[in-house]
Image: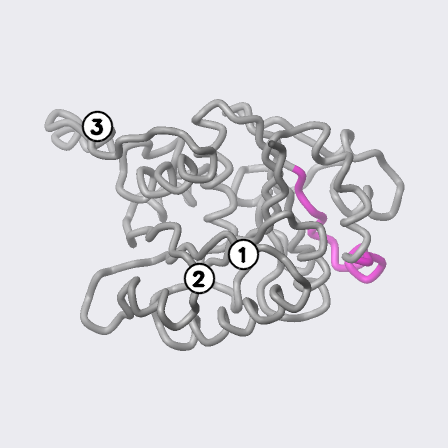
Amino acid sequence: MKRVIVITSGKGGVGKTTTAINLGAALNHFGKDVLIIDANMSTPNLGIHLNSPEVPVNLNHVLEKKAYPFEAIYEHHSGMKIMPSSLSVKELKKIKPEKIKNFKKDFLEVADFVIIDGAAGLGHEAVSVLDIADEIILVTNPEMPAITDALKTIKVAEERKKKITGIIITRVRRNRSELRPGTVKEMLEVTILGSIPEDISMQEALQERDAVIHTHPRSKPSRAYKEIAAKLADMEYDSNKDKPSFMDIILKRR
């Protein structure tokens, strides 16, 4: 079944865009047809993360009806599709983000999974993008300020009668100061889809301008994203069999 999944967060800087990219890359890894859309139009980073910061046609043109949706879609070397937004501040002033819901049918014609990277917070742009969602995945960090903001986002989504599939906890260090997954689940009353460990491979992937799924396919974050993607796609995946071999570790291939 085709699905539009909006990735959102209560606050910025928690790893929302990174999660949208790697979740899409993981679904694509399992053979799913994926389109990732940068609907964070005020601070778009999808193109930057995937080495396509400036493209001739983007989501802004689609929303202004200056281009058809298919014209703003670009194929990544991995096979997944992306639709960046404009980095231009001038174009931002013209955009009405609530119009994105009018193109849902068009997006679903080109992919089975449409992953939308929405804006963080509860401003007009962030809330407007929720309306296109079949389901919502919330990204947060295991700390109280992020969890508090996540709770507000959950309430807004529930008011709009949107299904919240679950929470992805990022930048997990497993130290004494951070909240445990069980505590997060109890506070938010939402399923925890998975936890993404803090790992140098994430920074290296960003430097290489690609998904960690591609740059470090057997790293801990990559396997964690694959586990979540497998759940969403209802597929089997054994993370233990995907661990790096001794030789990989020696050669630093993660």
Asked if marks 1 and 2 touch (Cβ < 8 Å), the reply is yes
Badge 3 density bin: few <14, some 14–19, many ≥20, Cα 10 Å: few
The image quarter containing residue 142 is bottom left
Is disc 3 placed on a helix, strand or loop? helix
Residue type, label 2? Val
Frontmost residue, 15 versus 127? 127
The image quarter containing residue 201 is top left
Residue type, label 3? Lys
First in sequence: mark 1 vs mark 2: 1
Residue at the disc numbered 2: 190
Give percent across and percent down for residue 241. 21, 28
Q: Nearer the viewer, mark 3 or mark 2?
A: 2
Residue at the disc numbered 1: 164
Give percent across and percent down for residue 137. 51, 53
Cα distance in 3D space between marks 1 and 2: 8 Å
Q: Give me the residue at 40% from left, 35% from top.
A: 230
Cα distance in 3D space between marks 3 and 1: 30 Å
Is disc 2 placed on a helix, strand or loop? loop
Is disc 1 placed on a helix, strand or loop? strand
Give the magenta part as a residue range.
83-96
Residue type, label 1? Ile
Magenta residue check for 86? yes
The image quarter containing residue 90 is bottom right
First in sequence: mark 3 vs mark 1: 1
Residue at the disc numbered 3: 241
